Image (spheres, coloured by chain):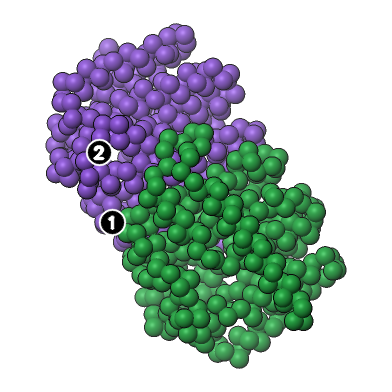
Chain colours: A green, B purple
Amino acid sequence: MTENITAFDANLRDCAHQVRTLLEKILTVQPKHNEISRPEKLLLAMRHGVLNGGKRIRPLLVMESTTLFDGNAATALRIGAAIEAVHCYSLIHDDLPAMDNDDLRRGKPTVHIAFDEATAILAGDALLTLAFDIISDDATELPATTKIELISSLSRVAGCGGLVGGQIFDLAGEHNELSEQEIITLQAMKTGALIRFSCQAGPIIANAPIADRERLSEFGAAIGLAFQLADDLLDITADTSTLGKTAGKDVSAAKATLVSLHGVDWAKRQLGGLIQQAEDLLKPYGDLSKRLVQIAHYIIERKN
Amino acid sequence: MTENITAFDANLRDCAHQVRTLLEKILTVQPKHNEISRPEKLLLAMRHGVLNGGKRIRPLLVMESTTLFDGNAATALRIGAAIEAVHCYSLIHDDLPAMDNDDLRRGKPTVHIAFDEATAILAGDALLTLAFDIISDDATELPATTKIELISSLSRVAGCGGLVGGQIFDLAGEHNELSEQEIITLQAMKTGALIRFSCQAGPIIANAPIADRERLSEFGAAIGLAFQLADDLLDITADTSTLGKTAGKDVSAAKATLVSLHGVDWAKRQLGGLIQQAEDLLKPYGDLSKRLVQIAHYIIERKN
């Protein structure tokens, strides 16, 4: 198992490096066709928000779920980078004073602390917009119909019925006690939808059959739930320096989570069941799916 | 001329009504495929920001530039609505306390006043995301290649090298005196790019030849400049109740504009030249372009 973990770590680092290199290349001052000028301050804030040592779990899921169906790795990297841009924009906006008011993200000052609030709002806006630029760009070598399928899904999982809507529910949860069903819905929207889409993106990129897309989507749903449970557990059990963001936030905000409702032991049992479910879903692919299974394990065993 | 103006007014009102009706239909609580749930509060804030009696100049430009090349009107309406969603998101974010801190927009409370700051940020995010949903949706009857062309252009004119970048320059201009060239660049990014794209969208939708796309793009550039000059003039000459937003903002923020640099008379002469240039560009289309020329005139003669 140690050997596997080491190989997985190398794989994770390699993916993170590729995502970083691509986003660095994209976020340069040279304007592209149809652009007028790229303000340096805005670019610096976008880079601060996106080139910040994130684990790049979502791009890794896109890349491995693409490889599983023999899809193009360079294309998967670009789609992964687009999804990461959406993820990072949502973190920048979540951290704003009007929302979670957080000064620290991955051990570094958040964008509105390193720059200012207006710049952070705009850097988030520009990263969200950039995601659609990256997918539609000629450099993303996919048929237009596939690009449209990806853009349609991404806009739905990121918009009012997904990521953004989840954040509204989350903020509401700081003032009102949410029911268990409301917590499940909010987490599916805020965390689950983008992770699920990352897993589904692979078979879409590789033009795999519908049945495979659905299987990978179910896999994504299981590990999305596991990811959120693991996050809620970490908020209770880890300290701020390990976490790289403020620990105990949910407790201090009196924010209900499934872990606060059902306890740590229940959460650990649930995690076991979800990982089993995720593994079972990938059984038909045999050894080819080994790396995706490793990601599932990493998600529940990570320390930050 | 009175007859023309009356016909034009009816045309403008009809387009605004169609845009409103479509956006109302799109912004309902029923989640679409790939969405989980649409929070009512978020929808209300999005509707407040987008169903607010705007003039819908941009959708009108899309519709008329599509009609000029015999393109599909229903499709043009959807693309126009997407562009309007981008325009309205940018207004919601511009009005935020961290940016222009404005309480009034089109004579009504801005979104962060009617709701709260977090909700306004998220409503803007969701409207921006929605624009890409609308274009990529099956209901937009266009070949995938055309949709990708529209999405690529829209993401470029709206992103760090266009709309968002223009707002960063605009905020910088409140603290530092901008040069004439800097003002021209910022206005091209903040106002010009989206108006230009609205004019270019028609020939793209209608699959017209490149030469026509370029001609309409030049027409869009001319009326974009005229639009901004007219706006700067109105800021000096109109009062708040006519304008529906706070008048004299540029003067009180000591914000340099081309009008403040060169004076009202210069600006009026410039406007005359730009309208002439816009008319000349459309001469090859003869009577068919009458409505687009009327929009150009409306832009410089409007009172708010």
Q: Is residue B91 above or below residue A58?
A: above
Q: Amino acid at mark 1?
A: Ala
Residue drawn at the location 58% of the way across and 34% of the way down? B149
- Residue B178, disc: 2
Q: Nearer the viewer, mark 2 or mark 1?
A: 2
For mark 1, what is the residue?
A: B98
Give the CA separation, mark 2 to mark 1: 21 Å
Q: Secondary structure at mark 2?
A: loop
Q: Is residue A303 above or below residue A31?
A: below
- Residue B233, disc: none
Q: Are marks 2 and 1 in contact (CB under 8 Å)?
A: no
Quarter of the picture holding the C terminus of chain A: bottom right
Do discs 2 and 1 belong to a common subunit?
yes
Mark 2 crowd level (few <14, some 14–19, many ≥20, 10 Å Cα): some
Residue drawn at the location 75% of the way across and 68% of the way down? A291
Nearest to N terminus: mark 2 or mark 1: 1
Foreground: B59 or A230? A230
Q: Position of residue A255 (x, y in %)?
A: 43, 79
With A269 as the anchor, is B30 left or right in this view? left
Is residue B118 among what the camera can see? Answer: no
Residue drawn at the location 41% of the way across and 25% of the way down? B220
Q: Secondary structure at mark 1?
A: loop
Q: For residue A259, which quarter of the picture?
A: bottom right
Residue drawn at the location 40% of the way across and 66% of the way down? A110
